């Protein structure tokens, strides 16, 4: 009898322990990724850029809110928010409160699909199967019919009032201690709102440094930024895979980016040019899949230095 039931019970116990860890501990084990990126022109002083992404705020997530507020102690030169701030229509005040100290610094933002629409309940096993088989999402998806409208306008107004630049299919410029930083942004490719033709043409000659910003790192957007000569692209969306296998990595990226570049710093090449790309694993999850495994929630502090 023991032999008959011992193995299944053991597997069940391990699975339950793993789920408890993934949902109860790792989702609240916030980390800071530190990265040095050699992209600045010669003679330009280093810049410290804080990237926050995929907060997916659900009302009542106090530990996440405290951690986000604490990031202001890093004293970045500027902040880039790469979208998906919401996972709850009631979460806007808590996002603005959590990011309040960071909004004292120069900053800019793009939105992701979950800023516009609430998440939908899905079978996680089906999601993983479809994504690993490339069944859908490789070029982005239109919004789900009947999706809940999130109050993104209130979020936009809060960011704009603080002076952050709205990079929705447009360009903007930050002045950082006399340096002119040009930012070129796109709306979310995951729901086909990106319009690169509106911002095409590459970096301005007058800017001291230029970079691209987008929520979801679909290859068409990476190709366009890279071919236009942007030395650095920031993105989020992937959650770093969210459910990863130790010593193997991510199973999915939720877009057409390969899993080898699902998070952190890498490069992208298109039309004979190469750009650095940084993908944040983000610090939240959908309210319907509040688990992470071997992929802790994070923000990223990028130190930009002279190119080699």
Image (cartoon, rainbow, N blue to C red):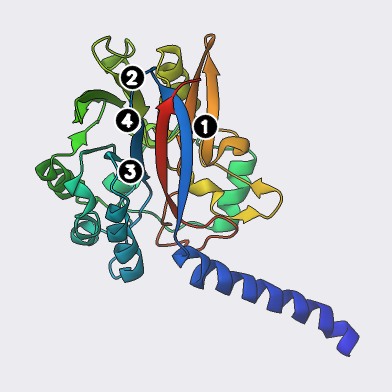
Q: Distance from label 3 to label 2 (Cα)?
A: 18 Å
- Towards the viewer: 103 or 167: 103
Foreground mark, 2 or 1, reads 2
> Which comes before the other along the chain, label 1 or label 3?
3
Q: In the rendered image, which quarter is residue 76 located in?
A: top left
Q: Is residue 87 left or right of residue 171?
A: right
According to the picture, the residue beneath numbered tag 3 turns out to be 83
CB atoms at circles 2 and 1 under 8 Å apart?
no
Q: Distance from label 2 to label 4 (Cα)?
A: 10 Å
Label 2 crowd (10 A; few <14 / some 14-19 / many >=20): some
> Which comes before the other along the chain, label 2 or label 1?
1
Q: Distance from label 1 to label 3 (Cα)?
A: 19 Å
CB atoms at circles 1 and 3 under 8 Å apart?
no
* Callout 1: SS: loop
According to the picture, the residue beneath numbered tag 4 turns out to be 193
Label 4 crowd (10 A; few <14 / some 14-19 / many >=20): some
> Which comes before the other along the chain, label 3 or label 2?
3
Task: Name the residue rendered at 24%, 57% in the picture.
Answer: 95
Q: Distance from label 2 to label 1 (Cα)?
A: 17 Å
Question: Can residue 71 be seen here?
Answer: yes
Q: Quadrant of the N terminus?
A: bottom right
Label 1 crowd (10 A; few <14 / some 14-19 / many >=20): some
Q: Distance from label 3 to label 4 (Cα)?
A: 13 Å
> Which comes before the other along the chain, label 4 or label 1?
1
């Amino acid at each position: 009898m023991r032999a008959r039931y011992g193995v299944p019970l053991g597997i069940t116990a391990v699975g339950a322990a793993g789920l408890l860890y993934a949902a109860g501990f790792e989702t609240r084990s916030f980390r800071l990724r530190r990265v040095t990126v050699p992209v600045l022109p010669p003679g330009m002083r280093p810049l410290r850029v804080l990237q926050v992404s995929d907060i997916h705020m659900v009302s009542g997530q106090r530990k996440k809110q405290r951690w986000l507020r604490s990031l202001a102690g890093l004293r970045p030169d500027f902040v880039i928010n790469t979208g998906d701030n919401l996972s709850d229509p009631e979460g806007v005040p808590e996002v603005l409160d959590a990011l309040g100290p960071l909004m004292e610094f120069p900053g800019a933002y793009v939105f992701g699909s979950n800023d516009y629409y609430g998440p939908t309940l899905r079978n996680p096993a089906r999601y993983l199967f479809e994504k690993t088989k490339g069944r859908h999402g490789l070029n982005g998806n239109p919004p789900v019919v009947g999706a809940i409208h999130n109050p993104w306008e209130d979020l936009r107004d809060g960011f704009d009032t603080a002076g952050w630049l709205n990079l929705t299919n447009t360009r903007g410029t930050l002045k950082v201690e006399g340096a002119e930083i040009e930012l070129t942004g796109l709306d979310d490719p995951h729901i086909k709102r990106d319009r690169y033709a509106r911002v095409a043409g590459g970096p301005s000659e007058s800017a001291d440094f230029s970079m691209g910003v987008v929520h979801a790192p679909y290859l068409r957007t990476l190709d366009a930024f890279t071919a236009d000569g942007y030395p650095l692209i920031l993105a989020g969306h992937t959650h770093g895979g969210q459910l990863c296998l130790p010593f193997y990595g991510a199973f999915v990226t939720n877009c057409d980016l390969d899993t080898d570049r699902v998070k952190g710093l890498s490069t992208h090449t298109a039309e004979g040019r190469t750009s650095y790309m940084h993908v944040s694993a983000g610090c939240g999850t959908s309210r319907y899949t509040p688990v992470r495994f071997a992929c802790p929630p994070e923000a990223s502090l990028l130190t930009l230095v002279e190119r080699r």
